[in-house]
Amino acid sequence: MPSTQGTRKNTRKTATGEKRSTRSASSTRSTRSSSSSRGGSRRSSAAASTRSRKPRTNSRNSGPVRAVNAQANPNTTSDGMPLIAPPKYRKGSMRIVPLGGLGEIGRNMNVIEYNGHILLIDCGVLFPEEEQPGVDLILPDFNYIKDRLDKVEALVLTHGHEDHIGGVPYLLRLRKDIPLIGSKLTLALVEAKCKEHRINPVLKPVQGRDKMKVGAFNLEFISVTHSIPDALAVSVKTPAGHIIDTGDMKLDQLPLDHKITDLRQFAKLGEQGVDLLMSDSTNAEVPGFVKPETTIGPALDRAFGEASRKIIVASFSSHVHRVQQVVDAAHKHGRKVVFVGRSMVRNMGIAADLGYLHLPEDTVVDLKQAADIQDDKIVYMCTGSQGEPMAALGRIADGNHPDITVGEFDTVILASSLIPGNEHGVYKVINKLTRMGARVVNKDNAAIHVSGHCDEGELLYFYNIVQPKAAMPIHGEHRHLVANGLIAVKTGVDPNNVVLAEDGDVVDLYKGQAAVVGSVPCGYVYVDGQSVGEIGEEELEKRRILSEEGFVSSFLVVDTDRREVVSGPKIYLNAVAEDESDFMEVRSRIVSDVEDAMARGTKDNHQLQQIMRRTLGGWIARKFNRRRPMIVPVVADIAKDVQR
């Protein structure tokens, strides 16, 4: 990246791995205050599969770094260095700030700024892992734009997957009239989602090759092929330059709906000059080209032909193409299809109503009707392909789905790719299903899925068509971003013009040059039931300890006036392997430590409880091989109760 004026010198690597010295725009530390709406205090630069408490890779250097602990400063980078505040916006430049999707698979969101005007591209969610118990969704951090929402001209949605639209209702809670721009199917899916939140969004449908002026931004939309119909890339032009955000895409030449990626339009835009190409990185490490969607049909047909009892197919609830192939195979083999799961039923209903999903007459039946259909004549189309425990397939595997059971010789088909980080959950579900006697068909033993993202060969081809001056890889873990950057260099992009950014980095495009000029706080925002942003890493750490180590409570009655323990301590255990009798020897230590503290004049209940916690916790760690259960001490003081 080219040098910019400033006072603090940093080292940043290009996509080729060569170190370059650059100056940040400021040596001052970001002064944006910490907020409870940030999910923890770390930057989201780590791979999705290593979030939370594992070694991570930082986009500021290519080596592994230690994860920032739960108490780290929110104004630090993923390697613990202070954030470098970006300079004041330079009039006439275009500023790009990714709030999600760089260093992770999910919660994609980019902010584009020009002379006080703001354009948003996508607003998705990230799904939690086992290390985030109780969390439903993870949102982008809106704090960067929260005080300037009146400057937002529109939100462009590239396609209808949850990692691109799932956060929209939460953004609209802050300002309900932000115009949503997208294709017909994308907006229909968003509208249904918003209505569940009692929000009526402002919708502006577009299609490929449509042009639109929004505030200071001249937009043009380009049709792209993905694993959901009606996906679009967006070209954004201002006097400061021309950028393209591809969204998720691939170059499938035989898509089911016959709508290929509009390479002609990309070539025209390339001839006009593209200053910065922001392209999908998800499959940048995979050599070759993605197989066409049409190759899945024969594999499904074979699986259906070999099935002797019921069939359960799991896929994403928005994967219209895959559902179409399942419906076609079921119809061919004389089976009825049942959509299972609220999102699957809703999305397929929308797709069918709009003509994107074609359902042969009398093929789809309601879940209630399925009980009257014999096993060899039924197909359940459900969610849960990523091993989500509360999705339909997870509940089936656990044996607690109210309507569907798995038995010997049933067939289960996982017709989706594995999102990095979900491997453990998926194989856990597969093992449960095989123990029940089911035959599980997945990517390991059948060509049952093709990706919706460009492989390396397609990206090479794409870069050669667009020929951008600069490249900023988006949508992927750090390794994917680096691989994408290397591809850009292979096609002739100057390594100094490859911007390897992470969530929260501020990228300025000025006079055709793109550079990271600073960073802003950008953490995880957790949705937990009805609460948004109310829990952070400290609360999650407590939940992790409770789920992994168990719960120990201790109750003690004292008289601080007489400075003695009156009763107890009584110790209660929950989800701890040991018996309460094993804790006999620590009781006397607790009494001794608490009475010593009272003898020194300590009367505060909280301080006495902390003494109990330290004594009990230290003893447990020494006695039971460094175990760390959650400890809840309770002290009742007779002296205070009598005074009241």
Image: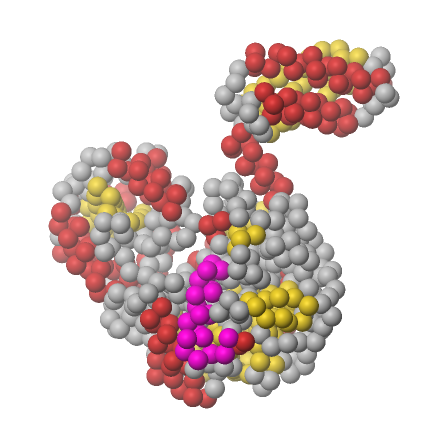
Q: Position of residue 321 (x, y in %)?
A: 28, 62
The quarter of the displayed image where residue 329 is located: bottom left
Q: Residue at point 60% right, 84% down? A: 511
Q: Main secondary structure of the magenta part?
A: helix
Q: Residue at point 13% right, 47% down? A: 306
Judge left or right: residue 151 versus residue 432.
right
Q: Residue at point 34% right, 72% down? A: 458
The quarter of the displayed image where residue 417 is located: bottom left
Q: Is residue 448 above or below residue 396?
A: below
Q: Position of residue 385 (x, y in %)?
A: 34, 49
Colour scheme of the rendered structure: secondary structure
Q: Is residue 69 above or below residue 573?
A: below
Q: Position of residue 351 (x, y in %)?
A: 33, 62
Q: Position of residue 586 (x, y in %)?
A: 65, 15
Residue sitting farthest toward the bottom: 272
Q: Residue at point 27% right, 33% down? A: 435
Q: In front here: 460 or 559?
A: 460
Q: In front here: 346 or 252?
A: 252
Q: Is residue 205 above or below residue 389?
A: below
Q: Is residue 418 magenta?
A: no
Is residue 195 visible in this depiction of the protein?
A: no
Judge left or right: residue 304 versus residue 479.
left
Image quadrant holding the N terminus, namely: bottom right
Judge left or right: residue 568 versus residue 52.
right
Judge left or right: residue 358 versus residue 244.
left
Q: Is residue 640 above or below residue 36?
A: above
Q: In front here: 412 or 461?
A: 461
- What span is colored magenta in the figure? 476-495
Q: Is residue 485 magenta?
A: yes
Q: How many marks?
A: 0
Is residue 83 visible in this depiction of the protein?
A: yes
